[in-house]
Image (cartoon, grey):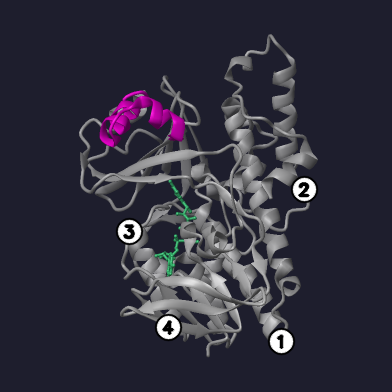
Amino acid sequence: MPDVVIIGGGPAGSTLASYLSMAGIDNIIIEGANHPRPHVGESMVTSTTRVFEEIGFLETMEREGFVKKYGASWHAPQRKGVFTIEFGEFPQPGIDQDYTYHVDRSKLDLLLLKHAESLGTKIYQGQYVQEVLMKDGKAVGVRINSFGEPVDIKAKIVVDASGRHTLLGKQLGLKRPDPDFNQFAVHAWFENVDKSIGKRDDDIHIYFLTCERGWVWQIPITDEITSIGVVAEKEVFKQSKQDVESYFNTHIATNPNLKNAMENAVRVNDFKKEADYSYSMEKFVGDGFLCVGDAARFVDPIFSSGVSVALASAKYASEQIVKAMEKGDFSEAAFKPYETKLRSGVSVWYEFIRLYYKLLPSFTHFIQSKKHRLEVLQLLQGEVFDRQDVPVLDAMRKFIKDVEQNDKHILRNALTDLELPDVAAAQEIST
Ligand SMILES: Cc1cc2nc3c(=O)[nH]c(=O)nc-3n(C[C@H](O)[C@H](O)[C@H](O)COP(=O)(O)OP(=O)(O)OC[C@H]3O[C@@H](n4cnc5c(N)ncnc54)[C@H](O)[C@@H]3O)c2cc1C
């Protein structure tokens, strides 16, 4: 019987497994798919570097030649205007490089899984976990289906790293959809995208759209291949009554810079859709279990936060699991510090995202302001954990309030309907 059984071998599962194996804790991963398998989420933020280094994976990232990401560029809607940030403007403690990576997730996720295996984790692929076994309210193992026969695998601790499948959250009825965000994304890979439009070809390029919470990502996967994704409220897609391809092309044509970039683009794989992806589990831990990565919480991907949150959650969960193993205490209370830490970090992302969508020009204003630029940059690097306060979010909130209270403000019409609760209530919602 392993000490820990991990459901899912995405970035969260493989990273957690690596930390546990390094700590000498016996663990297995049960992964439903057979890697390599495709996955959305191809651009990272620099805080991931710290985790890659800790688990001894940074060398692999360098060796495999992933596209280096030095910054991000945003393109205004309906007019030609680009503004950019560079990660190197603000050195991050404990990180020696001023770039992160864009990745083909099928390659990254396979490499991470293999890395965990090389550290001692046992990997079982092509086996979907059917359910988590519960006894007196405590997780005690998992059930898989092997050639039509149910097989039970017992463990001291069960970790749900099943991503947006949220196996345990669904089983225990813990999943709460986000009250405000209901985004829908359509994406595919293209050749011949003209990436010369901004300062740096290999930035992530974000193009603002005029529709509700609409934007497009442009992520270089290799020199030849570029991932393009259109994101908007699901309602925008529904009301368009278009098929996926026409919907995609309609939105590409609305931003002049994007239209130019895509002029000679040729699609090289099928369109994929992603929907209903903003939610939180009511709790991330319970007796005998923890949820990590997307299996715990998912916030809108506008700032490429997902993989960094998955890796950080794996790191913090591993710390609590090590302590639990030392004490032999696998109770909800023993795992709670992990939940508290993850919640407070992700709530910083969430608040940042809400302010961004409430008044888009406030983001461009703050990122260009001498006073606040570095603080915004710090958030965009993924430095959201262990923060006592985040003054730039207070400043953004105040800026937006001033616009709301002034009928004649030049940005007044740019305000969206998204409610911004006061600070205390914001904390409440973001959990
Ligand atoms: C539209 C969109 C755009 C995004 N863009 C970005 C981006 O640019 N940058 C970024 O960092 N993040 C992005 N993300 C988020 C990113 O995809 C996720 O945050 C990240 O993949 C989370 O990793 P994970 O390991 O938690 O889950 P996953 O990567 O989903 O891994 C979960 C694994 O569990 C396996 N699994 C599921 N159910 C079972 C089961 N029952 N039994 C066994 N195995 C199972 C799956 O096969 C999978 O391999 C985006 C997300 C969306 C929706």
Instruction: Look at the numbered discs 4 and 1 and tell me whether their residues touch, using CB distance below 8 Å.
Output: no
In the rendered image, residue 429, in percent from the top left (x then y), is placed at 70, 44
Left or right, 431 with respect to 296, comes to right
Q: CA distance from mark 2 to mark 4?
A: 48 Å
Q: CA distance from mark 1 to mark 2?
A: 34 Å
User: What residue appears at the point 59 percent right and 15 percent down from the top-left corner?
Assistant: 413
Check disc 4: other Cα within 10 Å, few if <14, some if 14-19, many if 20+: some
Picture layout, residue 178 above or below residue 150: above
Mark 2: amino acid: Asp
Judging by the rendered image, the residue that carries numbered circle 3 is 38
Q: Which residues are magenta?
A: 232-254
Judging by the rendered image, the residue that carries numbered circle 4 is 151
Q: CA distance from mark 3 to mark 1?
A: 38 Å
Residue 91, disc:
none
Residue 328, disc:
1
In the rendered image, residue 66, in percent from the top left (x then y), is placed at 36, 60
User: What residue appears at the point 62 percent right and 69 percent down from the top-left corner?
Assistant: 290
Q: Earlier in the sequence, mark 2 or mark 4?
A: 4
User: What residue appears at the point 57 percent right and 28 percent down from the top-left corner?
Assistant: 360
- Quarter where residue 358 is shown: top right
- Quarter where residue 51 is shown: bottom right
Query: Which circle, 2 or 4, is nearer the viewer?
Result: 4
Q: Earlier in the sequence, mark 4 or mark 3?
A: 3
Q: CA distance from mark 4 to mark 3?
A: 28 Å
Mark 4: amino acid: Val
User: What residue appears at the point 32 percent right and 39 percent down from the top-left corner?
Assistant: 195
Left or right, 172 with respect to 344, comes to left
